Image: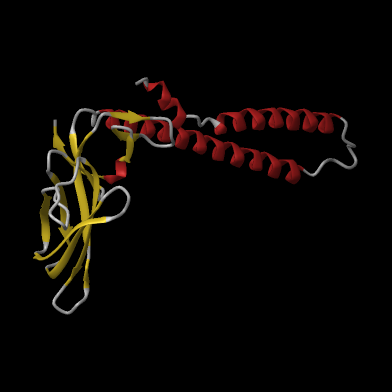
Amino acid sequence: MALDAISNVTSLGRATADRGMIAEDFDTFLQLLTTQLQNQNPLDPLDTNQFTQQLVQFSEVEQSIKANENLESLLEISAANIATAATSFIGKKVMIQSTTTDLTDGKAKWDFIAGSGATTATFTVRNEAGDVVWSEDKSIEHGRDTFKWNGFDKDGNQLGDGRYSLTIDAKDADGEAVATAVEVSVMIDGVDFSGVEPVLLVGDEGVPLSHVTAVLGA
């Protein structure tokens, strides 16, 4: 994986082009002003306030462009740092915000976080087609916990390996909904730099950096 693709997030430089344009305009302005001063009528001299104001305006525009250049430099440094940080995830296991994981040899596991305790929580597992293959109700406590599934469907049949998703519908004793977040652990295989921001790769799937909730190690 080549890191030249980092250039995709550093294609800035608009301020540099603007600085060149303002410099050309300023040179033209000075030439015109000099010509006017040389050919002015001594009995009716030019109003110095006008070209003084124009000089001030040119100065303000130049300062604004300089500020933009500094900002672009900071953005380039930030983008490079983010790209470098993204590569450090390669080969590491991380927790990400996702409801989908793999069933392998009759084992699948999801982590979840409950905003508060729930007297009833319905755990529903679906296959890739979106069909419900397993569902069970149980109470959960506030905080982080794990849900494990052995791969059997609701009719007692052992299902094959593949991708399955989990949703949780939790309610407290008053019947109010309890917020839950589902996470899974994955191994990062690479980083994709083709977009605006680096995307971690898990197999052929992309995971935004913002979806990573914890780094578990190699």
User: Looking at this view, is 11 or 92 the one in front?
Assistant: 92
Where is residue 75 shown, x and y percent of the image? 42, 35
Which corner quadrant holds the N terminus? top left
Q: Please state if 208 lies on the left or on the right of 123 as rendered.
A: right
Residue 138 in the image: above or below residue 21: below
User: Looking at this view, is 18 or 76 the one in front?
Assistant: 76
Residue at (15%, 45%) from the top-left corner?
108
Counting every numbered tag in the picture gives 0
Asked whether the viewer can see residue 146, the reply is yes
Res. 50 image quadrant: top right
Where is residue 79 shown, x and y percent of the image? 38, 33
User: Looking at this view, is 203 or 130 the one in front?
Assistant: 130
Residue 168 in the image: above or below residue 209: below
User: Looking at this view, is 74 or 207 the one in front?
Assistant: 207
Res. 15 image quadrant: top right
Where is residue 60 shown, x and y percent of the image? 59, 42
Asked whether the viewer can see residue 115, the reply is no
Which corner quadrant holds the C terminus? top left
Residue at (12%, 38%) from the top-left corner?
105
Q: Please state if 15 lies on the left or on the right of 91 as rendered.
A: right
Residue at (19%, 77%) from the top-left corner?
175
Residue 34 in the image: above or below residue 59: above
Image colouring? secondary structure
